[in-house]
């Protein structure tokens, strides 16, 4: 049974009961004994009647086919895959067990409504898919037991620390065995244009996306366009296998898993990194103003590619980027292998969990 199947099976545990889930994976034969992680991941709450959160995805799949994997689910699946690889045991959505063991750490990865399902007595490790900003966290969060909140990158942590005393940075690992470089002879498209412009898309279609597309066409480059939320993972993987480079357009990212999947696939990236304030319109400028190193590529160095700030910057630096692509000067997969493997992410997560428990028991 793969991780996705285990998630669907274990999610059937009722929040007010349920049998103990099997430990996954089996205990390591050698090495020091590690604590067992209690993982909780839910993408949706019940809407119409108790338990319908488990039925709705099945109905959707029957009607519409295989669904797009959300960023939150990808974080959870990759964490489990990494824990499997390094031999760290865990339970998934075992609410019955955690209620009987208030002394053990509860790691809630998914949506915050899980906190409302019963009175949690456990120390908590929350995130990374919980709250976009402390401004939206409920007051009752302050009344819960010792809790540490995970966010995916340093600039996001710096934004949250004035409100949350215990914030840790944790990026999930990338499936480097799945996202691998394709043979050079398979590369028959020059540029994959990845459009993840989330707000004011019509404005940026005029100011950024269309000028970039025109410049590429004028330069004689072939282009394939993918828009965030409108593709399946297999389509994206196929596109990366055929493209020599990628242009990544997003206002800002807390991790940027899709971009890192491209890097792991050996595809150099030219990224729009406009800097400036965090401009999520739900918060800016009426609730939150933050300008501390906001980035669309928080995990990136010279091996990965280059960045630009606007359409003019793209035009100015495109030839330089493309010449480095042609010369093979970039080594994006090396960056991912050094920093963002599944094993690295899983071990880092465990270290944070262990430190939370040590702090709790002092």
Image (cartoon, rainbow, N blue to C red):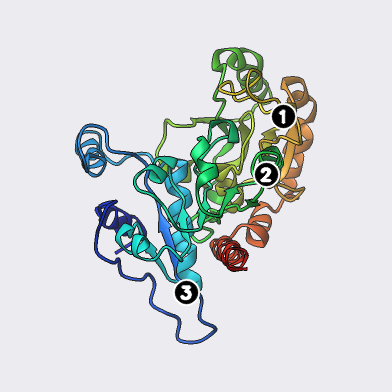
Task: Give the class, few, some or many, for how many residues have Cα within 10 Å of label 1's Cα (few <14, many ≥20).
Answer: some
Residue named by callout 1: 290
Q: Residue at x 57, y 25 (%)?
A: 197
Mark 1 and mark 2 lie on one chain; the one further toward the N terminus is: 2
The vertical placement of 65 against 4, above or below, is above
Q: Residue at x 33, y 60 (%)?
A: 94
Mark 3 and mark 2 lie on one chain; the one further toward the N terminus is: 3
The vertical placement of 117 against 205, above or below, is below
Position of the C terminus by quadrant: bottom right
Mark 3 and mark 1 lie on one chain; the one further toward the N terminus is: 3
Tag shown at residue 212: none
Task: Give the class, few, some or many, for how many residues have Cα within 10 Å of label 3's Cα (few <14, many ≥20).
Answer: many
Residue projecting furthest to the bottom: 30
Which of 150 and 246 lies nearest the eye of the viewer? 150
Tag shown at residue 157: 2
Q: Residue at x 76, y 36 (%)?
A: 293
Relative placement, left or right, of 163 versus 197 is right
Cα separation between marks 3 and 2:
29 Å
Residue named by callout 3: 87
Q: Position of residue 177 (x, y in %)?
A: 50, 61
Quarter location, residue 36: bottom left
Position of the N terminus by quadrant: bottom left
The vertical placement of 223 against 323, above or below, is above
């Amino acid at each position: 049974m793969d991780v996705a199947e285990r998630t669907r099976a274990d999610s059937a545990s009722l929040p007010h009961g349920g049998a103990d889930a099997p430990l996954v994976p089996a205990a390591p034969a050698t090495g020091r004994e590690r604590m067992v992680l209690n993982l909780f991941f839910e993408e949706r709450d019940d809407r119409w009647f108790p338990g319908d959160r488990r039925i709705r995805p099945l109905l959707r799949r029957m009607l519409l086919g295989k669904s797009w994997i959300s960023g939150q689910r990808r974080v959870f699946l990759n964490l489990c895959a990494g824990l499997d690889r390094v031999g760290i045991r865990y339970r998934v959505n075992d609410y019955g067990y955690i209620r009987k063991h208030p002394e053990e750490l509860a790691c809630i990865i998914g949506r915050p409504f899980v906190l409302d399902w019963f009175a949690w007595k456990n120390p908590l490790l929350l995130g990374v898919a919980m709250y976009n900003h402390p401004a939206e966290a409920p007051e009752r969060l302050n009344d819960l037991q010792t809790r540490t909140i995970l966010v995916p990158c340093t600039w996001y942590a710096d934004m949250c620390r004035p409100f949350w005393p215990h914030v840790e940075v944790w990026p999930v690992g990338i499936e480097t065995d799945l996202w691998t470089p394709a043979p050079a002879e398979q590369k028959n498209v020059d540029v994959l244009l990845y459009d993840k412009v989330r707000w004011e898309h019509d404005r940026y279609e005029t100011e950024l996306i269309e000028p970039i597309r025109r410049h590429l066409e004028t330069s004689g480059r072939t282009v394939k366009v993918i828009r965030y939320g409108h593709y399946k993972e297999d389509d994206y993987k196929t596109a990366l296998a055929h493209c020599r480079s990628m242009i990544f357009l997003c206002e800002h990212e807390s991790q940027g898993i899709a971009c890192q999947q491209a890097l792991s696939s050996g595809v150099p990236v030219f990224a729009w990194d406009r800097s400036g304030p965090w401009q999520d319109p739900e918060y800016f400028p009426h609730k939150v103003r933050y300008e501390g190193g906001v980035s669309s590529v928080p995990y990136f160095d010279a091996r990965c590619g280059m960045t630009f700030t606007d359409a003019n910057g793209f035009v100015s630096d495109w030839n330089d980027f493309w010449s480095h692509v042609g010369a093979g000067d970039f080594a994006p997969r090396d960056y991912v292998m050094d920093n963002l493997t599944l094993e690295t992410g899983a071990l880092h997560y465990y270290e944070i969990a262990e430190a939370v428990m040590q702090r709790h028991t002092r």
